[in-house]
């Protein structure tokens, strides 16, 4: 089956407000042409190995380009995001409409329960498990609802560094059951929970410089990994596990605090069978 990813062209993208530290000093400092070029390059790469679907960019919601935050998908279920900041809340009806029109079962959390979709909720690739980042954007209180609606165990992880405000900025489950992540973005208890689930030989930790280049904010599809930038050491680590890493600059989007993974949302998320967990 061909995988499908949702993207939103940067037609209305700009840094228009500050809701994370990356945006500080970058308001109205963007270059639209460069942003369009960078986005197109990523869309082409993803399009080479998967199908790219598009949601139309709406005016007035410049961060809508970050479709990872639309919601969380598992099979045909789509849990719509409830954005913490009012600047992004107006994206919700656009995403709700697109998913309803594309035959997803749209599930809606209470509006006082912040949840930022696949920015903070990531499926493990080794066992049937949902990792939920909390502490900045999503509320830990949504964990029981997600577990119930999606019939999956949820493991909450506390994010402790403002620069890594979404789980997908510092944590990237990879096919084959691997996990690329930046341990310093998590509190000690969360680091221990990660280690308890993911055997050492499946953990790929990234160093500070790679983390700040958004290496963990990677798109993974099969053996392919697309990311903004990675050191030779990290590329070597990933290659030795059979991954093919393609670097594609996304500096215009990093001014808003996002990179490759944030600009995409995988629409084809199958349930991993429990048997793989004990393999
Ligand atoms: N400016 C956006 C925000 O702060 C960036 C979102 C990046 N998305 C992501 N999935 N990490 O919400």
Image (tube, rainbow, N blue to C red):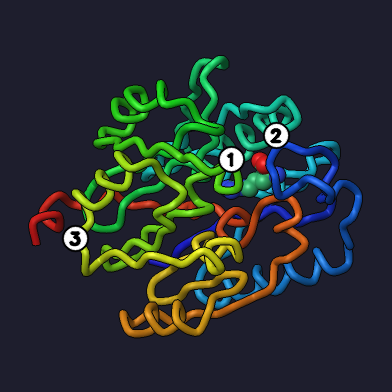
As displayed, is residue 62 above or below residue 8? Answer: above
As displayed, is residue 139 above or below residue 17? Answer: above
- Indicate the position of residue 125 as horizontal and vertical percent values: 30, 57
- Residue at image x 72%, y 25%? 86
Badge 1: residue crowd in 10 Å (few <14, some 14–19, many ≥20): many
Badge 3: residue crowd in 10 Å (few <14, some 14–19, many ≥20): few
Identify the residue under disc 3: 199
Q: Is residue 129 left or right of residue 52?
A: left
Q: Nearer the viewer, mark 1 or mark 3?
A: 3
Q: Can residue 79 be seen from the camera position used here? A: yes
Disc 2 and disc 3 in contact, CB within 8 angstroms: no
Which quadrant is home to the C terminus? bottom left
Q: Is residue 177 left or right of residue 223?
A: left
Disc 2 and disc 1 in contact, CB within 8 angstroms: yes
Q: Quadrant of residue 61?
A: top right
Q: Number of callouts in the render?
A: 3
Distance between the Cα atoms at labels 1 and 3?
31 Å
In what element is the residue under mark 1?
loop
In what element is the residue under mark 2?
loop
Q: Is residue 51 left or right of residue 182?
A: right
Distance between the Cα atoms at labels 2 and 3?
38 Å
Q: Ligand 1 is located in which of the four quadrants?
A: top right
- Residue at image x 62%, y 40%? 98
Disc 2 residue: CB within 8 Å of ligand 1 = no
- Indicate the position of residue 66 as horizontal and vertical percent values: 65, 49
Disc 3 residue: CB within 8 Å of ligand 1 = no
Q: Nearer the viewer, mark 2 or mark 3?
A: 3
In what element is the residue under mark 3?
loop
- Indicate the position of residue 204 as horizontal and vertical percent values: 34, 67
Identify the residue under disc 1: 70
Q: Which label number is shown at residue 273?
A: none
Q: Which label number is shown at residue 91?
A: 2
């Amino acid at each position: 089956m061909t995988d499908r990813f949702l993207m939103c062209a940067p037609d209305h993208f700009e840094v228009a407000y500050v809701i994370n530290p990356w945006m500080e000093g970058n308001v109205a400092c963007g270059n639209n042409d460069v942003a369009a070029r960078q986005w197109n390059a990523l869309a082409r790469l993803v399009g080479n190995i998967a199908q790219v679907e598009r949601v139309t960019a709406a005016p007035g919601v410049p961060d809508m380009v970050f479709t990872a935050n639309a919601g969380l998908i598992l099979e045909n279920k789509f849990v719509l995001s409830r954005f913490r900041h009012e600047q992004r809340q107006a994206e919700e009806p656009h995403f709700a409409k697109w998913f309803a029109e594309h035959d997803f079962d749209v599930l809606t959390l209470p509006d006082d329960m912040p949840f930022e979709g696949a920015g903070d909720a990531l499926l493990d690739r080794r066992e049937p498990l949902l990792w939920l980042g909390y502490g900045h954007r999503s509320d830990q209180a949504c964990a029981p609802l997600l577990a119930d609606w999606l019939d999956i165990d949820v493991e909450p992880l506390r994010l402790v560094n403002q620069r890594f405000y979404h789980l997908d900025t510092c944590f990237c489950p990879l096919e084959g059951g691997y996990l690329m992540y930046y341990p310093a973005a998590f509190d000690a208890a969360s680091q221990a929970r990660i280690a308890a689930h993911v055997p050492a030989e499946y953990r790929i930790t990234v160093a500070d410089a790679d983390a700040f280049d958004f290496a963990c904010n990677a798109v993974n599809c099969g053996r392919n990994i697309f990311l903004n930038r990675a050191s030779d050491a990290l590329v070597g680590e990933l290659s030795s596990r059979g991954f093919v890493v393609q670097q594609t600059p996304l500096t215009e989007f990093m001014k808003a605090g996002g990179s490759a993974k944030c600009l995409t949302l995988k629409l084809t998320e199958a349930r991993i069978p429990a048997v793989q967990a004990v393999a």
